[in-house]
Amino acid sequence: MSSLFPALTDDPSGRPALRFGERSLTYAQLASAAGAVGSRVREEGRVAVWATPSLETTVAVVGALLAGVAAVPLNPKSGDKELGHILGDSAPRVVLAAPGDELPAALRELVRIDVEVEAEVEADADVQGVGASGPAVASVGDEDPALVVYTSGTTGPPKGAVIPRRAIATTLDALADAWQWTGEDVLVHGLPLFHVHGLVLGILGPLRRGGSVRHLGRFGTEGVTRELSTGASMLFGVPTMYHRIAEALPDDPALAKALAGARLLVSGSAALPVHDHERIAAATGRRVIERYGMTETLMNTSVRADGEARAGTVGVPLPGVELRLVDEDGSAVEAYDGESVGEIQVRGPNLFTEYLNRPDATTAAFTSDGWFRTGDVAVRDPDGYVRIVGRKATDLIKSGGYKIGAGEIENALLEHPGVREAAVTGEPDADLGERIVAWVVPADPEARPAERELADHVARRLAPHKRPRVVRYLDALPRNDMGKIMKRALPS
């Protein structure tokens, strides 16, 4: 197949590729450093990567991909039990890490290879396996694995989703079409590099286009302002980051100006609350666009750069992606009415190959005709825009004969000035089947809104049957590293 990164292999040059803080690499330097890593791991089947937000992680992953070796990104915050499971399941013999990284006990049985970025760049490129036309690239096929990314499931240990090179290439090219993404774009983000958002979209995306990425290391509005004011054209973030931006905007005109000058603001990994959309749009004149994907499918849908950035939607299917909504009995939900709820199923070249060592789970994840069951529930608007309303397992509430998505109720609650955070779940009810429960973090703990006030607020915005029957107040909602609310961790 053609190279994942033509700019590395066709004509390495002095164009900037990566910047992490004060450290940066041009395409020629990245080709040299990644080519050196590739030459050291070429005989391995899979390699673990200690995925800190650093140049070393990027060089390690790109080097493995050039060598035709699958990389297994490891979350540095994972505990020994989880790391032990991942290493036992994926069986790498080698771990790639930055020289100064202290690795946990679970990794000490592996051969460690330090990624010496500066030393490799300074070394003779030809000695390190980089010729005049770029680094040596292994002969690999479209279906060969590129990454094994472990998903944090709701039950049982994480499963390793095997992502082929085909899925990475087709997803990134589909996003280039949807977002008018070119080599002229400069992306800024502060996302972790052990999952598909930060690594595949945020790092491999710019490199495939021949553009550049500036990683903030740690997200902060000051860094966003600095980078967008000095040549960056795109910003990727998760809702927690955009919430912090929305909170800062009233007192930070420089941030507002920087965001107003960006070509594209993209949010993903969870739904961005409508009130944050509106606050950002009001302050900057720019609307954040959302896209929808997951580890197993990479990207499925997006609002297009030339389309309407409508708050609360994730746009339309990307080129090459088939999407359908399915009822519980397996029948297709044909309505485009913004109300009829169904589970999203997708099919296309963006899909993963299998769960590593889990043929049972792989089989269960697909229908007999090859559609992947996402477990997400959504509605479709009349023009085809998709609106995610939650997870089938935790966010689809059956109350009084209605199927209700928790997401729209959460957005309605967040529009109340007395609500800072909100989550909605269902619990058994003898009369309704399930009653709607709202978990609310008040904007002011000393003046929290009354339950009846919040219920009426939702009923006026949505419908009476969607109002919460119970409101429970918390100091904070449990969230994971990506800012997603962990509903199963809510108090019982």
Image (spheres, grey):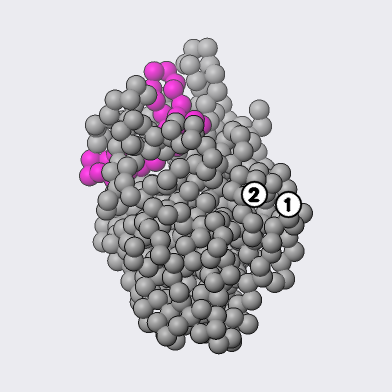
Mark 2 and mark 1 residues within 8 Å of each other at the beta carbon: yes
Q: Which residue is drawn at 59% across and 86% down?
A: 123
Report how far apart the C-alphas of labels 2 and 1 lie in the structure.
8 Å
Between disc 2 and disc 1, whose residue precedes? 2
Residue 395 among magenta residues: yes
Q: What element carries label 1?
A: helix
Q: Which of 179 and 398 is in front in this view?
A: 179
Which range of residues does the magenta coloring cover?
380-405
The percent coordinates of residue 454 (x first, y second) are: 51, 34
Q: Nearer the viewer, residue 479 or 200?
A: 200
Q: In the image, is 452 to the left or to the right of 334?
A: right
Above or below, 71 against 255 in this view is above
Q: Which residue is drawn at 46% across and 77% down?
A: 135
The percent coordinates of residue 203 (x first, y second) are: 48, 66
Q: Which mark is residue 106?
A: 1
Residue 338 among magenta residues: no
